[in-house]
């Protein structure tokens, strides 16, 4: 049986794996930034300095995270474009690229919404929502696309 993709090289696998781990680390750092994350409270118990720090970290996270995600998607797409053998693989690749575009639009929309919420004093809630939504979006993406590519490329079919 013909494979749809060639196997990832060790370097390609490590690059994608490291980037996925870095995305998880970003999320964990966002989680840890908010002292009220697990209590489900808002920022009312925090002093002005802590509140300002969290607002700044949320804004910084958004910019750094989206820049990293864009670079990660570019790396993944470059690798995928080089390993496709069949029409099925090429179609899977195009679906993957479309999903990247959709994810970026959703992230930008979510970040705008949460920046407004943070400016209104709901920074802890914004951090929690960003954390959970990003984890959900990227978890679904990984299950649908990345895990197949990383673990079982020969099983990728339409």
Image: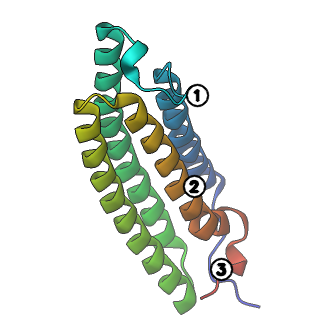
For the N terminus, the image quarter is bottom right
Residue 103 picture location, percent across and down: 39, 61
Q: Callout 2: helix, strand or loop? A: helix
How far is the residue under mark 3 from the one under mark 1?
Answer: 39 Å
The front one of 6 and 157 is 157
Residue 38: numbered disc: 1
- The answer to which quarter of the image holds residue 65 is top left
| Count of picture labels | 3
Name the front one of labels 2 and 1. 1
How far is the residue under mark 3 from the one under mark 2?
Answer: 18 Å
Residue 86 in view:
no
Task: Give the residue displayed 33% in from the left and 31% down from the top.
Answer: 122
How far is the residue under mark 2 from the one under mark 1?
Answer: 36 Å
Residue 21: numbered disc: none
Image position of 49 with respect to 157: above or below = above
Residue at the disc numbered 2: 12
Residue 28 picture location, percent across and down: 55, 32
Task: Give the residue displayed 71% in from the left and 78% down from the top.
Answer: 154
The front one of 93 and 145 is 145
Residue 156: numbered disc: 3
Image position of 74 with respect to 46: above or below = below
| Drawn side of residue 3 relative to residue 111, left or right | right
The front one of 124 and 145 is 124
Bin the neighbour count of mark 3 within 10 Å (Cα to Cα): few under 14, some 14-19, many 20 and up.
some
Q: Earlier in the sequence, mark 2 or mark 1?
A: 2
Q: Callout 3: helix, strand or loop? A: loop
Q: Callout 1: helix, strand or loop? A: loop
């Amino acid at each position: 049986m013909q494979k749809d993709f060639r196997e990832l090289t060790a370097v390609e696998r490590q690059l994608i794996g490291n980037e996925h781990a870095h995305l998880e680390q970003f999320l964990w750092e966002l989680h840890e930034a908010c002292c009220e994350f697990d209590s489900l409270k808002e920022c009312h118990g925090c002093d002005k300095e802590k509140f300002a720090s969290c607002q700044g970290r949320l804004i910084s996270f958004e910019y750094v995270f989206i820049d990293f995600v864009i670079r990660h998607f570019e790396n993944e797409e470059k690798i995928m474009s080089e390993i496709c053998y069949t029409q099925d693989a090429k179609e899977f690749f195009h679906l993957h690229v479309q999903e990247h575009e959709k994810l970026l639009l959703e992230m930008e929309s979510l970040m705008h919404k949460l920046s407004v919420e943070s400016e209104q004093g709901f920074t802890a809630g914004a951090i929690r929502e960003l954390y959970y939504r990003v984890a959900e979006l990227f978890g679904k993406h990984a299950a649908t696309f990345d895990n197949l590519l990383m673990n079982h490329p020969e099983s990728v079919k339409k």
